[in-house]
Amino acid sequence: MEDVTDSPFRSICKSFGADILITEFICSEGLIRDAAKSKVKLTFGEEERPIGVQIFGHDINSMHKAAMIAEQAGPDFIDINLGCPVKKVVVKGAGAALLNDVPKMISLTAEVVRSTSLPVTVKTRLGWDESSRNIVKVAEMLQDTGIQAISIHGRTRSQLYGGKADWTLIGEVKNNPRMKIPVFGNGDIFTALIAKQMKEQYGVDGLMIGRAAIGNPWIIREIKAYLTEDILLMPPSLQERVDILKKHLSRKTAYKGERSAILEMRKFYSGYFKDLPDFKKYRMRLMMAQSEVEINEIIKEFTIYH
Ligand SMILES: Cc1cc2nc3c(=O)[nH]c(=O)nc-3n(C[C@H](O)[C@H](O)[C@H](O)COP(=O)(O)O)c2cc1C
């Protein structure tokens, strides 16, 4: 997830048991131009393996070059984003826009498969809109290009993040006898209970967790404990949450500088301190904090009173 799953946060998710990690999406044109932001997104630590680098774009030639650059970074696989609904991506014909042009989606995917010796996977949605929920057919066609796995978010592009994810078609893809590659389900897994229900009801090979992990990376530990041992874990103690937050902040600061770290950390506070009483006024202060030292002071004050 952009501005979320950078290397510092991924390594924290790994420590909670994430089996497979994927970078933030990286613009193919940015990679080719050698843009600093795209290059940073390509970096990862050895402990993050197996890791995929996710690329997106609209131009087949650029995707060919981007796949070769991504391969040089040494990931375990390359993932293609065929589902991003954000306007600035879609207007260029990339991400979910390719759901509107299936022949191009297929040629672009086939080209990436040809461009690298690494396994290629894709991440997509159910279709463009309500009238074109064509993922069952599209998944078969994508499989025929030689991809090794598919992740499906149970919404159309038109839905953006609204409404509820519909897993029925994800289940249909998984149960299609033509499908041989692993199918990962994605969308609205916010608790271990939901994770188990989706896994059992739709038989998917894996679950992809997005928003629920923001400020809540221990959800991965909770889901695994429930799936494998039927244990429902308690939420972490305040001390554990604080330790994770501090680790996250200091790694982020070292990774991309204090200014960016402070801005990006703002997405995480509500999650890290979820359900703790009296957090609201501390959250306001955290949102306005200007340095790592100041953030650590505010957190210290919060813990003293709890
Ligand atoms: C802030 C944010 C950034 C995202 N960035 C990406 C991205 O770079 N690549 C991608 O495949 N999906 C991205 N997504 C979509 C998520 O991977 C996921 O498909 C979606 O949030 C639905 O799953 P969830 O209900 O578990 O969050 C992003 C979502 C959010 C909220």
Image (cartoon, rainbow, N blue to C red):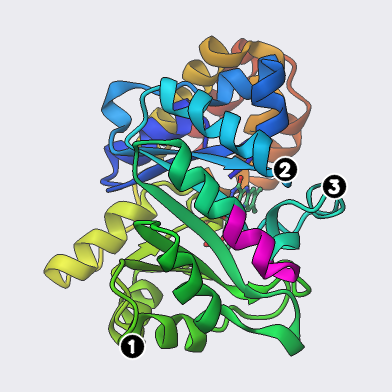
Q: Amino acid at mark 3?
A: Lys
Image coordinates of residue 228 in percent, x first then y, are 15, 66
Q: Amino acid at mark 1?
A: Gln
Q: Residues within 10 Å of mark 2 (few under 14, many from 20)?
A: some
Q: Within 8 Å of ligand 1, the CB of disc 3?
A: no
| Of pointers 1 and 2, the one earlier in the residue sequence | 2
| Residue hosting label 3 | 88
| Of pointers 2 and 3, the one earlier in the residue sequence | 2
Query: Where residue 59 is drawn, which disc sits there?
Result: 2
Residue 256 picture quarter: top right
Image coordinates of residue 77 in percent, x first then y, are 37, 40
Residue visible at 46% across and 26% down? Answer: 8
| Residue hosting label 1 | 201
Closer mark to the observer between disc 2 and disc 3: 2
Q: Residues within 10 Å of mark 1 (few under 14, many from 20)?
A: few
Q: Amino acid at mark 2?
A: Asp
C-alpha distance separating marks 3 and 1: 35 Å
| Of pointers 3 and 1, the one earlier in the residue sequence | 3
Magenta residue span: 99-107
User: Do labels 3 and 1 touch, CB within 8 Å?
Assistant: no
Residue visible at 53% across and 82% down? Answer: 137
